[in-house]
Amino acid sequence: MKAFLVGLLFIIAVSFLSVLGVFLYPFLLLLTFVLRIIIGMALVVFAVWLLGKLIIFIWELLSGKQQITRGKS
């Protein structure tokens, strides 16, 4: 009788978890889409920031060379 109750409890637990997984499936799909959008936006923001840093770095290099050549003449 004890083994029957343990087996029955196990079957109930597995069925409960499978039903819970079915109910969580739309949430997991939504979570993957939201995470994909957030990661994509973070990559775009990082790319814009990196481009800005590169432009500022090149601008300072060019303006520094122009000041050196102006000082020599």
Image (cartoon, helix red, strand yellow):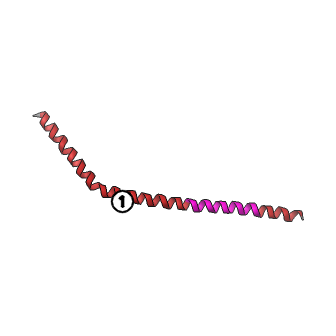
**Residue 56 shown in magenta:** yes
- The residue under the point 32% across, 57% down is 27
**Residue 54 shown in magenta:** yes
- The residue under the point 36% across, 59% down is 30
Quarter of the C terminus within the rendering: bottom right
The stretch in magenta equals 46-62
Question: What is the quadrant of residue 26 in the picture?
Answer: bottom left
Q: Which percent across, then down, holds residue 56?
A: 68, 62
Q: Main secondary structure of the magenta part?
A: helix
Amino acid of disc 1: Leu
Q: Secondary structure at mark 1?
A: helix
- Does residue 66 lie above or below 12 as drawn? below
Residue sticking out furthest to the left? 1
* Label 1 Cα neighbours within 10 Å, binned few <14 / some 14-19 / many ≥20: few
- Does residue 15 lie above or below 35 as drawn? above
Question: What is the quadrant of residue 54 in the picture?
Answer: bottom right
